[in-house]
Image (spheres, rainbow, N blue to C red):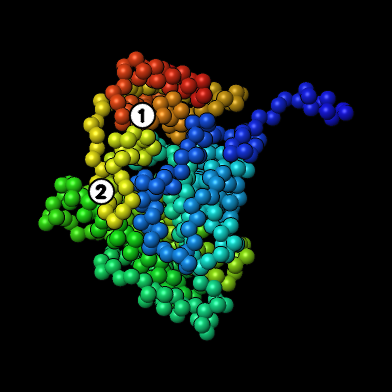
Amino acid sequence: RRNQSTNQHAPRIPALEIDGKSYTEDGWTNVSPSILSYLPRKLHLQPSHPVSITRQVIESNFPSPTYTHYNDLHPIVTVAENFDSLGFPKDHPGRSRTDTYYINRDTVLRTHTSAHEAQIFRDNKSEGYTISADVYRRDAIDRSHYPVFHQMEGARMWDRRKVPGGDVARAIWTDFERLPKHGLSIEDANPTTHPERNPLQAEHHSPGEVEAIAAHLKKSLEGVVVGLFSRAQKAAVAAGHADAAALEPLKVRWIEAYFPFTSPSWELEVLWQGDWLELLGCGVTKQDVLINAGVPDQIGWAFGVGLERVAMLLFSIPDIRLFWSKDPRFLDQFSVGENINAFVPFSKYPECYKDVSFWLRSSSSSAGGGMRSNAQDFHENDVMEIVRDVGSDLVEDVRLVDDFVHPVSRRKSLCYRINYRSLERTLRNEEVNQMHESVRKHLVERLGVELR
Ligand code: FA5
Ligand code: MG
């Protein structure tokens, strides 16, 4: 009875209700209603959406029953799944609240599809899998970044106890020989392992095993990229964006990379309109991840590819916001089938630049205060989040255009330039002014800055 009456007067513990589950809010909570509104969209499952078409094209390189395709795993995962199970160090910057959307201290919106690796290794249903899903990251605002995007993760395992004669390297090379040939020569300048930069997991793998895994991994992914890009080039020619005779040969290269959950690791890049563009990260799965998932006898590889990044090239889509458009002028241009067609942009609407300048609170003034957003704990992603909450898809990009420290007061001043532009219509002056005023107000209220 006493408990009951105490409870009546205790402050209500705020809770978030998401998909029929209740999550307690705490000091880590930084998800907003606007970010949660993306959860039901699942673009990778909308039948003729370019993200979904891209998923289906890539999946066809990883056929069942060798690979199980997981496409409907829930985006809310534990911190343990997203980071700990993959060996992220406790102080890894990816864990910070400026980079990751927290539901509460223990629960996040997944930042990558790798969050499900350990669980699927544990379930051990097939030798391989792909997972396609929406992932969430607090990040910059521009035409190639969006706080929600889609990834496909893939993995392949071989069980030491189940291969003929226990010779796992030989079994992998046998599977390697069965992979489709792509006939493209691909730049791969670095050795498979490097003692410091890209080490062998010597307690678990022999160099010969890693050579075999790396060869199978690279050839599998090269096949994906060559298949995709020969289709993209055909589409560009058909749309008159490129001349068949003048078409540059496809250029693809491997470079070394680092992930806490693979070693050695690589990234695959493609030369696209003059720039090397990163498509995916991959590597030899860390044996500790497999051991902790209860499958110590399996060894293998994993990769993660950004579906929007591929789809933008494949369909010539110029702005990542377009994927979220419900405008039939966008959606009706795509259909599932053998041919990939280049997107025909509808007319561009006018841009509208507005600047906002402010002083950060000087670090000394925070000494007694506990106020956030002094010069030390200011993070640009917090500005991005405010602009996103206010402007949603009506903002094309946000850029820092000025940054200086006052010579006497030592206070720091920043100026951001916001480009308001809709993909679907001309914005009215008055609505842009209202949005900009609201951004200014929230910067003061939420970050404690002083407008100039
Ligand atoms: C990862 O997320 C790793 N989980 C990938 C991985 C899986 C490595 C398994 C090893 C084994 P990364 O943060 O680099 O890595 O993202 C992978 C891909 O997602 C990138 O190559 C890119 O294609 C895409 N990507 C990353 N950030 C964005 C973004 N903000 N917008 C669009 N695509 C992005
Ligand atoms: Mg990367």
Please state if 445 lies on the left or on the right of 55 as rendered: right
Residue 94 in sight here: yes
Number of numbered discs present?
A: 2
Residue 259 makes an appearance in the image: no
Residue drawn at x 57%, y 77% is 161
Sooner in the amino-acid sequence: mark 2 or mark 1: 2
Q: Report the mark closest to the observer, 2 or 1.
A: 2
Q: Is residue 116 above or below residue 327?
A: below
Which residue is at a point 31% across and 40% down the rendered structure image? 332
Residue visible at 45% across and 80% down? 170
The residue located at (29%, 35%) in the rendering is 329
Which kind of residue does numbered mark 2 sit on? Asn
Secondary structure of the residue carrying tag 1 is strand
Side (left or right) of 396 relative to 247:
right
Q: Is residue 437 above or below residue 207?
A: above
Q: Nearer the viewer, residue 299 or 123?
A: 123
Q: Quadrant of the C terminus?
A: top left
Circle 1 sits on which residue?
395
> In the image, residue 336 lies at what x, y percent?
33, 51
- Pick whichever, 91 or 389, lies toward us: 389
